[in-house]
Amino acid sequence: MKSAKGGIISYLVTVIVSVALLWAGHLWAGYDPSANPNLTVDEEYLKAEITEIVSVDISEYSYGSGQTDIVFNCVVLSGPRKGETITASQSVSDLGAFRIKTVEKGDRIVLVNGAFQGSAASADTWFFAEYARSDAVFALLGVFALLLILFGGRKGVSTLISLACTCLAVIMVLVPSILAGKDIYLATALTCAYMVIMTLVIVNGYSAKTLCAILGCLGGIAVSALICFVMQKIIRLSGYLEEQDYFLVLLNPDIDLKAIVYSSILIGAVGAVMDVAVDISSSLAEISRKIGYVPFSDMFTSGIRIGRDIMGTMSNTLVLAYIGSSLCGVLLICSYKTSLLNIFNAESIVAELLQGIVGSMGILFAIPVTAAVCSLVYNRKKAAKNTEWFMN
């Protein structure tokens, strides 16, 4: 009873400390959006549901294209004007590269205030901005959270907490620190270390298994960071990979795009490396708990063999995730009749390859590091006898 009570207290303390570290990191970042006048946008957004289509005006241009202007009434669903009925409009042109779906009665949409155009007279004029998509996404997120709790029980709750802290670490610490001009390499290292330690401790508790997984994961990430830093110098990355990069530099000319590429590679690799370290640590912990003392060489060999079975699928997972996230760019480049020499030297393609290779190398190095740490820690007589060290 005392052990269970102590476990709950230590768990709550861990969660509180994790949240406190997040807030401390946010204060350290010290980013103030109002300090940059280029980032100050005088806009107001409302979520609304269309109740009536007032008019549809189709204009045709002399060169074959046209524009559709739709005026509609809608009821506001959020904000201080909730419940009000306002009139707004949507303009859809045929000139764009893609066609926006015209609004219909019953659609839930996001409206933007016309004041952003700089005219005081248009302050109460509203325009279609986007379809309201967040409700469906949050509903799916709720289903995901419910399934995690149903299938995982306490581990499911811990997974949700760690996932929330991971997302907040990026949003509250890493992103603000980059925008505030902090050292991106330092901010990335701190964020990665926080995510690894916080996730493993919250999900698996305080144990030798958790300690080994943390050290193995940090070892693999450290190798990935070193390789990524060196390769950036060798292949002479500029950091201009996407259209958003140009706009980011326009807003903040001092930002280091190469460091952002470095940060994105490491953040993307953390999850896969963590999985490998946890799998090896848990497997060797179970061997030690069942058998007892196992010679260092035998346990290390077992860890390497377990890692060999894991690394193939995890490397595929990592590479496929990067390819899937940039599939449109790959299709666009490959659609042109250009040489393979040009394709495989394009900076955007090289950056994607670098992400997959560096992440996979982090997985490879995490295997022997985790196996070695486990062999050292689990071979201690005290750890071999004290089964409480191997908490589930």
Image (cartoon, helix red, strand yellow):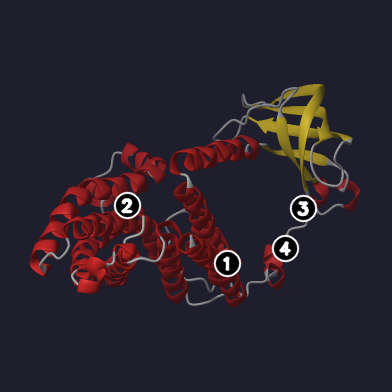
Residue 43 image label: 3
Q: Amino acid at mark 3?
A: Glu
Q: CA distance from mark 4 to mark 1?
A: 34 Å
Q: CA distance from mark 3 to mark 4?
A: 9 Å
Mark 1 or mark 2: which is in front?
1
Label 2 sits on a secondary structure element that is helix
Number of labels in the image equals 4
Q: Nearer the viewer, residue 326 or 83?
A: 83
Circle 4 residue: 40
Does the rendering let one see residue 249?
Answer: no
Q: Residue at x 17, y 48 (%)?
A: 309
Q: Amino acid at mark 2?
A: Ile
CB-based contact (under 8 Å), mark 3 and mark 4: no
Q: Position of residue 369 (x, y in %)?
A: 22, 67
**253 relative to 288, above or below:** below
Circle 1 residue: 16
Label 1 sits on a secondary structure element that is helix
